[in-house]
Amino acid sequence: MELNREYFRAIIYYNFQRQLSQQECLAGLLSVFGNEAPHQSTISRWYGEFKRGRVSLSDDPRVGAPKTAVTQENVDAVRKLIIEDRHVTYREIEASLKISKTSIQKIVHEELGARKLVSRWIPQPGLDHFNSGNSKNVNSIAGEEKPTKVIRSRRVSKKMVATFVSKAGHIATIPLNEQRTVTADWYTTICLPKFIAELRKINPERRIILHQDNASSHTAQTTRQYLMEENVELLEHPPYSPDLSPNDFFTFPKIKNRLRGQRFQSSEEAWYRQRSLWDQEWNSIVFSDESRFYLGMHDGRARVRRRRGERRNPQFFVERHVHHPVGVMVWGAIAYVSRSPLIFIRGNMNAQHYIHEVLEPHLLPYLDTLADPTLQQDNARPHVARVTIDFFQHNDVTLLPWPPRSPDLSLIEHVWDMMGRRLLNLQRPPQTLEALREELVVAWNEIPQEDIDRLIRSMPRRVGECVAHQGASTHY
């Protein structure tokens, strides 16, 4: 005979009606059923229920999650997620549908009959939504067409940032560039100095109380020593307490909820998406670059009228120098309602020349005349060299990350084009380097500032067109 819960509850109810004590009830059950008898706490709980007038021996109905998550509704939802994204993971399905991994596995394998081939879930039957492309054959599903493996670009790694907020709002966000983990050295030499400088920009004597968790970079001796030297008070944080960190329970979830569902195939696409929301922010960007101008910049295409057969007539020949052209390299920067002086660079550009001939004597004084400037430069080697990046960090120069191969977004390229066309249209082109330098300075200074401001106001349209063309070339 199978002894279930209701059977023992009936015996307890019988003893309760006989007005036996709980100890007497327990002793009677042990004498008959031995180790199978219910525990004293169970007898005590049911005696209390019977005293309150309960007569039912069955369990109360439970309100909440069903006994199983393998419902037709969840099966349809999982099928829809797999069809929309062949790379969807268990974790993403779990976060979307709020069901356990065990239930997801059962739905995927038993209900949908899907297998994981070349990192794609293939529901049976049918491969209608399977992506194709330059591919290799792989093992096929029985009775189905052979799936193909699409060659995809390497996934872009996640971007880590350090964010500081206060009651007044956002203070600073410092990205972790060219580094995968936060170290005490990065935290004290790059991250914290930027945060403290931003907070004390108006009041250098401002009192700062910093709250941070117990990550190793936060609790390192060098970090504590640095905070002490900067007169920053540290609010101790209890371990394993993310619910006490506003960034953990508020800031980051808000940001992730806004970005949830967005997938970026490359860092360039993520860049375009983020800057497509900019408008007035472009007014604080300083666009800078170098260019080289040569003597005799004419392309040599002199058009003449000639009869058939006169192609080799020396009268229609134009002689040109075949040696390496002679010219000068210039550097300049433009911003909304302002521009830097035009700087001439001697020899070839390298990181040391860039720092000692451009950045120190010219860029830094120019940036000091602007309010909260952000410097834009392309990814030329002198610009991204370690010594150059260290120089910017040491002098608190904020850089705008720039996508590679994006000349149509670099506004100063249009300025160089304006100067080049002016030189080509001169009636008497410069014949010496000194004359070329003079003409370049005149051309730089005579470009109307309104034309530069118009270029800067076009940035939202440029970035929007890049987003629409998925990073391909634009009409700009």
Image (cartoon, grey):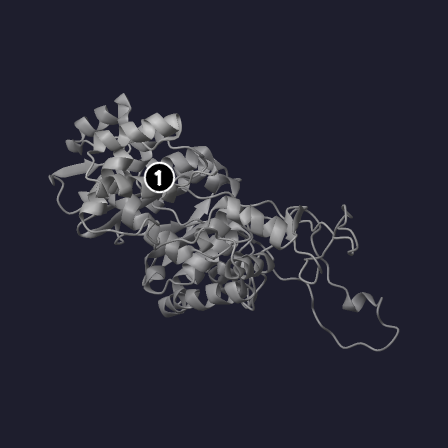
Is residue 126 shown left or right of residue 390?
Answer: right
Nearest the viewer among 67 and 39 is: 39
Residue 255 visible in the current orientation: yes
Is residue 363 shown left or right of residue 193?
Answer: right
Residue 184 visible in the current orientation: no
Estimate the x, y position of residue 213 in percent, counting from the top left: 27, 34
Q: Residue at x 38, y 26 (%)?
A: 35
Estimate the x, y position of residue 357 in percent, counting from the top left: 41, 40
Is residue 435 shown left or right of residue 149?
Answer: left
Q: Residue at x 30, y 44 (%)?
A: 248
- The vertical placement of 281 against 108, above or below, is below
Is residue 112 shown left or right of residue 236?
Answer: right
Estimate the x, y position of residue 6 in percent, counting from the top left: 37, 44
Query: What residue sits right under mark 1 in the picture?
Result: 8
Farthest residue in the front direction?
18
- The vertical placement of 368 against 211, above or below, is below
Estimate the x, y position of residue 160 in percent, counting from the top left: 40, 41
Give the tally of numbered discs: 1
Q: Quadrant of residue 124?
A: bottom right
Nearest the viewer among 36 and 424 is: 36
Mark 1: amino acid: Phe
Farthest residue in the right direction?
309
Nearest the viewer among 249 and 198 is: 249
